[in-house]
Amino acid sequence: MKLSTKISLFLATSGLFLLSAAPALAHNELIETAPAGGESVQAGLIPITLSFSEEPLDLGFGEGNLIAIADAATGEQLGAACAEIVGTELTTTVDIAKSGEYKILYKTASDDGHIATGDFLITVVNDTNYQTETPGNLCVDANGTVISPTDQEPLSVKQSSVGALEGLFIGIGFIVLGSVVSAILITRKQKREDYKRYE
Ligand SMILES: [Cu+2]
């Protein structure tokens, strides 16, 4: 057998081996969400369900497979990050009273070792004057212990009051102000020199 033939045979058989092994370990992909991205929902206890192509890899409650909710305007995460695994779905319930835009963030582990992350926006409207003391994701484990967001790495963090873009505008503002001031000073100096010339 020629060397090139041997190589081709080797590549063909290893290719077949990879193909047959592929379905055993699969990458998890988000298929659909409820509420859907961009959907408006009523304030209250809002169930969040994310449907995936595969069963998430169970790493324990509050670990690996997580859903969190954040104020879309500030980025502040409300409550902890957690999800229950039900078949190929991740679910949780969020308690939201304040109307506005919210970001749902998720993280899921699959048996091929990959971590998938993503987020989408929903709008909460409050027509019932619903109130809550504990806004955000309700994370209570099987023993009834509430997961504290301070014990976790948050999926979303509150942005500082001066964002990058605002910082840029403030910078431009100072440059513009600086050039206006120097232009006035130069004009005044010139005028003074002009008067001197006529005196
Ligand atoms: Cu993967």
Image: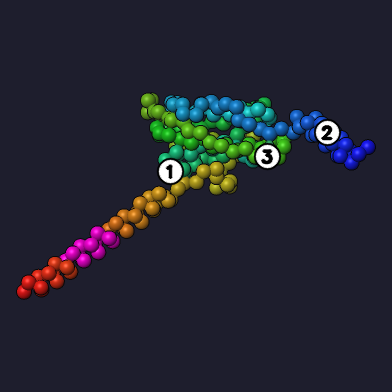
Q: Residue at x 50, y 46 (%)?
A: 157
Earlier in the chain: of badge 1 and badge 3, it is 1
**Is 170 positioned to the left or the right of 27 in the image?**
left
Task: Determine which quarter of the picture holds residue 8.
Answer: top right
Q: Residues within 10 Å of mark 2 (few under 14, many from 20)?
A: few
Can residue 137 be seen here? no
Quarter the C terminus occupies: bottom left
Asked whether 126 or 181 is in front, the reply is 181
Which stretch is magenta? 178-188
**Which residue is label 2 attached to?**
12
Amino acid carrying label 1: it is: Thr
Q: Residue at x 46, y 29 (%)?
A: 38
Earlier in the chain: of badge 1 and badge 2, it is 2
Quarter the N terminus occupies: top right
Cα separation, mark 1 vs mark 2, equals 54 Å
Q: Are marks 1 and 2 in contact (CB under 8 Å)?
A: no
Q: Secondary structure at mark 2?
A: helix
> Does 92 appear in magenta?
no
**Which residue is label 1 attached to?**
74
**Which residue is label 3 attached to?**
114
Find residue 155 and report its horizontal and vertical position in percent: 55, 43
Amino acid carrying label 3: it is: His
